[in-house]
Amino acid sequence: MTHSLHRFGQPEDLAGDYIVFAMPAQGVDPESAIRTEKEFLRRSLRHQPVNLGDAKKGGWFQPQKNLGPGVHWRRNTEPKPELVIDGVDAPGIVAAVFDRYEAMEAFVEELRELDLGVSINISALADRAATCCRACGITRHSVEYSLGFLGKTEKLPEKEILELATMCGHGTVSFGLAEKMMDRVRSGRMTPKAAARTLARFCVCSIFNPARAEEILSGKRKRG
Amino acid sequence: MKIDPRLCVECANCVAVCPMSAIHIDPEIRRAVVDEDECVECFACYRGMSSENLNPMLIRLARRTLGLFRFRFDPEPDGCPTAAIVPQELEWPRSIRRVFSDVLMTHEGTGILGRGTEEVKTNDVTGRLGPGFAGFVVELGRPSVGARFYDIEKVSRALAAVGVIFEEKNPITGLMTDVSEGALDPEVLDEKVMSAIIEFRTPLEGTDAVLQVLEGVAREIDTVMAVGVAARCGEDGQNDLESMLPALGYPIVRAKTNLGLGRAEVIS
């Protein structure tokens, strides 16, 4: 699946968006793969990820099915990394998302030293990933490039909505919800952080970058 | 997917949440309803929305009372206050919608979650894409427009005509009744999915021809497609696509880079 590949945005805006994920190939001993994935997730926490997830179980921002009426005044939306790590019970894709190049590079360096034996991929600006590989002494094995969107592109929404929604490659962050969150932030009914976390809860595999979403929603872009 | 009219309180939260815009409020019955022809059974509403499990009678009364004073009931924007969204049993061929749209469905052909395969993500272990080849991943319907299989077939037929090698384990290849022609099972052609991935490879020198085919057929479909192409790097970490793609008018911006840290010997 190309779930992380086609994030829409200008290069300067995508410079705050890095996904590192681990994926065992089919045939790997399941118990070994689970241990490895948990180790990947635990180690990522040392580098201040902005999201973390197991594609089978969800990320550290998850829907809450048992909210009470008090949620309108007080809702706990803090990340729950232990929920993600403890929840890994089958081989799959696990991912950590970073909003800083330096954090991503430090994590990749640690992964190289750890030698987990599973496939590790970086999904990011191509030149930043290449720079990271050189810095860590890694020879790239394969690269998949995004060539963008073809076809009836007039069906796509405005730039900011597309930037927000394409951070979930499986399409479960809808254009409509992205637009609704933008409206709520503009009208002062939600903070950018709360709106970003709301969107993140819909991305099951947790590659959504809430830090970048917060910048888009607040109109404050991090450049370079 | 259905919305239980006994539970729905017409808050309209699910309207914005639906990636296919398949939910609307029916003004006659004052309830949210799902347009079944547009719904792709992605489960984004059912699984993604939080819930307060409130009493619907109480909420309707509160809404009417607040409305008299020009106040409005304002639930959490990602929640269904009364857990009114209900999945339904799906029969063939409608069941194919969920297979391609619900991110947590494991496809029986690939053994993995999602709409595609491992493609180059595990290429360091599997060696699936070898030197000298370009591995294409063409995802119809992405981002969040959705695609009907008749449009997907237009693309697969156009690609088959230029002799691409379809990935055997890909779910779309599995739906082909004639791989040499890129023909899909006629029973599914009218079904709509969130997206579907056509995966194939071609010799690197065929990259330009494939891109021309895609640009041509893109004008004939009523949806969008996201295109990705991969290559294996040499011992120096370089690959031919890096110079080839900009020359063909496709600047290199984002990419997924396999670091080559996986080991084949860990496969049992």
Image (spheres, grey):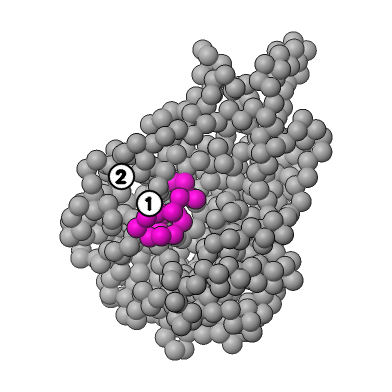
- Depth order, front residue of A130/A157: A130
Q: What is the span of residues highlighted in magenta in the rendered image?
A: B101-116
**Location of residue B157 (image quadrant):** bottom left
User: Which residue is outermost to the top?
Assistant: B68
Query: Where residue B25 sits in the image (x, y, percent)?
Result: 54, 22
Q: Is residue B107 magenta?
A: yes
**Residue A78 position within the rendered picture, expressed as x and y whole percent measured from the top left:** 76, 51
Is residue B4 within the magenta segment? no
For badge 1, the amino acid type reads Ala
The N terminus of chain A appears in which quarter of the rendering?
A: bottom left
At x 53%, y 24%, the residue is B4
Q: What's the chain of the residue with tag 1?
A: B
Residue holding disc 1: B196
Location of residue B22 with respect to B178 vertically, above or below: above
At numbered mark 1, what does the secondary structure look like: helix, strand or loop? strand
> Which residue is at 54% across, 79% downward?
A117
Q: Position of residue B60 (x, y in %)?
A: 67, 16
Percent across and percent down for residue B107 are 39, 54
The secondary structure making up most of the magenta span is loop
Q: Can residue A167 be spotted in the picture?
A: no
Horizontal side, residue B264 vs residue A90: left or right: left
Pick whichever, B70 or B176, lies toward us.
Answer: B176
Q: In this rendering, would A209 be left or right of B91?
A: right
Displayed quadrant of residue A52:
bottom right
**Is residue A54 in view?**
yes
- For mark 2, name the chain: B
Q: Which residue is mark 2?
A: B149
Is disc 2 placed on a helix, strand or loop? helix
